[in-house]
Amino acid sequence: MRRFRIVLLLVVSFNLLSLASAQSDRVELFGGYSLEQISPGCGSNYRCGATQNIPGPAASMSGWTTSLTGFVIRSFGISAQLTGNYGTAVLSSSHVNRYSYQFGPAYAVRWQRTSVFAHALFGGVTQSSAEQGLSYTRFILSVGGGLDYKTSSRISFRPVQLDYERQSVPVVDTGGPTPLPSAGANGWRYSAGIVIRF
C-alpha cells in the first residue's frame, strides 16, 4: 500500500511538471529540513482509549520534507508534498517513523526578491514503531504557508514554512492493540530549505 502511494505521488509530480513546462518559472522544487511537533490530545504515543483520554505531552520529531508545485495559472498552482520525520515516543521511549504524502492547491504572491505562499494539503500519514508493535495509516490535512527569498534567478532560500496539521490517530483498548474508531490529533510542522525554479 505504501508503494502505491509513493507511485501515485510520483505520477502526480510528473504531471505537474508537464503542465507547467510550457513556461519558465512555473515549477518549484523544494527540499529541506522538517521539525514536526505532535500534540496527541488523547494520551501518550498517539493512541486514545477509555483510560488514556488525558492529554499527553507533545512529541518533537526531526526529518526532511520535499514538495513539487506546478503553477497552472500565474499565482495558483497544485502542490505535492512528501515528508519523513523520526523521533521517540514521549512516554515509552520507543523509536517512531512518520511519513506523509499530501496534495492540494497552492497560492503564491511574488515580488522582485521575495514571495509568500499559502497552501492546503490533503493526504495520508503512515506511522510505525517496531518497539510498540504499532503501525497505521490515517488521513492528514495541513494548512499553512511560508516565505521565499530569491538568491538567484532560479534558486531561492525558504527560511520558514509553517503548517498546522490535523490527523487521525488510532484508538486502542487498554486491554490490547485492537483498533477502534480514530480520534483527532493536532500538530505543527516547521520547514526550511532550498527552492529551485524551472
Image: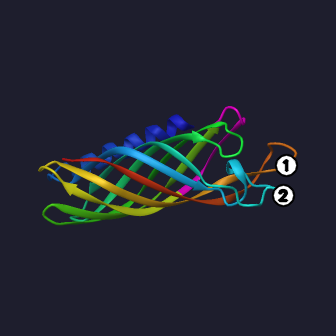
Kind of residue at badge 1: Thr
Quadrant position of the N terminus in the picture: top right
Q: Earlier in the sequence, mark 2 or mark 1?
A: 2
Q: Residue at 24% of width from left, 51% of height from top?
A: 157
Q: Which mark is residue 50?
A: 2
Question: Does the magenta portion include 20?
Answer: no
Q: Are marks 2 and 1 in contact (CB under 8 Å)?
A: yes
Q: Which mark is residue 26?
A: none
Q: Is residue 93 left or right of residue 78?
A: right
Q: In the structure shown, which secondary structural element does the residue marked by tag 2 occupy? A: loop
Gap between marks 2 and 1 measured at Cα: 7 Å
Q: In the structure shown, which secondary structural element does the residue marked by tag 1 occupy? A: loop
Per the image, the residue denoted by label 1 is 174
Q: Residue at 34% of width from left, 61% of height from top?
A: 146
In front of the other: 182 or 3 = 182
Q: Residue at 36% of width from left, 54% of height from top?
A: 79
For the magenta stretch, what is the residue range?
A: 129-140
Q: Position of residue 187 (x, y in %)?
A: 55, 58
Question: Does the magenta portion include 131?
Answer: yes
Q: Looking at this rendering, what residue extends furthest in the top direction?
A: 130
- In the displayed structure, would residue 20 be above or below residue 110? above
